[in-house]
Image: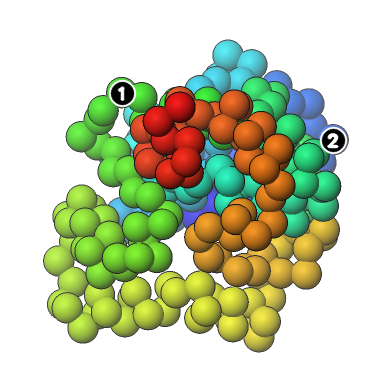
Amino acid sequence: LGESAEGWYARRAGRPTEGMPLAEVMALRPQVHRDFTTAFPDSVFVKTHNFLGECDGVPLHNMDVTAGGLYVVRNPLDVVISVRHHFGLSMDEAIARLADPTAATQSAGGHVAEFHNSWSKHVESWTAIPNPALHVVRYEDMLDHPRRSFGQMVAFLGLKPPKERLRRAIKFSSFRVLKGQEQRDSFKERSEHSDAFFREGQKDQWRNLLTSAQVDRIIADHGEQMARFGYLPDDRAGS
């Protein structure tokens, strides 16, 4: 399920959320999260882009109905490239957005507002305090070591799929397969600013697309969290 899917909020409110004040949308959020638990008879998986915090005094995540979480972190040097394409920004504008503590999306296009914060604050909000109910995985490790990374996630979730089923799950969640599915069937989260949601999915694209000054700016903005996850370039790691 998508946490920001407008239909759930409209169902709870009894009317569409278009034009609804933000405070009203936020008041619905904890109730909508509780509604998610009725979607399936067993575990319900919900994807969120929100940082771990509050808006208008209302938690962005209802922990009373949350058993745990998987947090995927990605190198901001590559994230900024995706941000550029998704929001239709210049590279410098995308770098600024990644450092903006007020970064958010408005209610539109079948989704209610989301609250991203800066990349650093988003990462810090979820990972600063170790929590046995949260499993953190680097996006790059999923690319480099898919069987190990997915195996660890499956173990964290308490699932015990046959090896062949896990192999198929990894295969069908590969970026190449997902991109092919989008080309065939479209994808509802594709931005109006981009031709595709699943574009490249590779790591280290920044080496060919960012200037040295842009790399310096991102490191200046996010160096502390980058260092935690091994994202500082080799020539900057000791600085």
- Which label sits in the foreground, 1 or 2? 1
Residue at position x 82%, y 47% from top? Answer: 89
Crowdedness near tag 1: few (<14), some (14–19) or many (≥20) residues, C-alpha within 10 Å: few
- Which mark is on residue 129? 1
- Which mark is on residue 19? 2
Q: In this orientation, which residue lies closer to the viewer: 36 or 108?
A: 108
Instruction: Tell me the quarter of the picture where residue 180 sits.
Output: bottom right
Residue at position x 73%, y 26% from top? Answer: 22
Query: Residue 104's x, y, as percent?
Result: 70, 34
Residue at position x 70%, y 38% from top? Answer: 213
Q: Amino acid at mark 1?
A: Ile
Q: Amino acid at mark 2?
A: Gly
Taking 92 as reference, is 129 above or below it? above
Query: Residue 162's x, y, as percent?
Result: 15, 77
Q: Is residue 184 visible?
A: yes
Query: Residue 196's x, y, as percent?
Result: 71, 69
Mark 1 or 2, nearer chain start: 2
Q: CA distance from mark 1 to mark 2?
A: 37 Å
Answer with left or right where residue 235 lies relative to residue 206. left
Taking 110 as reference, is 34 above or below it? above
